[in-house]
Amino acid sequence: LVRLLESGGGSVQSGGSLRLSCAASGDWASNYCVGWFRQAPGKEREGVATVWDSGASTYYAGSVKGRFTISQDNAEDAVYLQMDSLKPEDTAMYYCAAAPTVDYSRLLDASRFPYWGQGTQVTVES
């Protein structure tokens, strides 16, 4: 069993920044694939960014590319999501999720990730 705990959410003005953290424990391995997902009220959960190969490889959704950065600290068993130039439409509950492996074509597919954290709320005010 892999346990994931998110932190770092909060409320910020449009154009501001936040850094989310995902702490991993349990049957965790640094070569797991870890993704950040978000879900706004009334909307489906969507993939935001994914990291794999022990942090060497990353993939982003088009809506956040150039504004968000995903990274991994193997010594700390943690994955981060640096969010810059935040927009009101980024408001959502953010979740981290992990999987031993995910096909390249499914890196932002929530159904491919069996382990999930409880989420952290991000609110961007205009």
Image: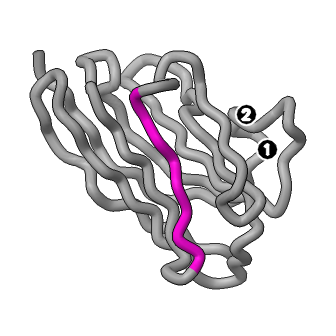
Q: State the SS at label 1.
A: helix
Say if mark 1 contacts mark 2, CB within 8 Å: yes
Residue found 51% across the figure and 61% down from its top = 79
Query: Where residue 75 appears, x then y in whole percent?
Result: 54, 83
Residue at horizontal 10 percent and vertical 28 percent from the top: 13
Horizontal side of residue 7 vs 50, given as left or right: left
State the residue position of label 2.
109
Residue type at mark 1 is Arg
The residue where tag 1 is placed is: 112
Residue name at image x 47 percent, y 34 percent? 38
Q: Distance between the residues labelled 1 and 2?
A: 6 Å
Q: In which quarter of the image is the C terminus?
A: top left
Magenta stretch, residue numbers = 67-74
* Foreground pick, 105 / 75: 75
Q: Is residue 97 above or below residue 93?
A: below
Under mark 2, the amino acid is: Asp
- Establish if 97 lies above or below 46: below
Image position, residue 125 (x, y; %): 12, 23
Quadrant of the rendering where the N terminus is positioned: bottom right
In the rendering, at what x and y percent does residue 60 appear? 60, 31
Q: Residue 100 is drawn in which quadrant?
A: bottom right
Q: Does the magenta stretch include residue 1?
A: no
Which SS class for mark 2?
loop
Q: Measuring 47% from the left and 71% from the top, which residue is drawn there?
A: 23
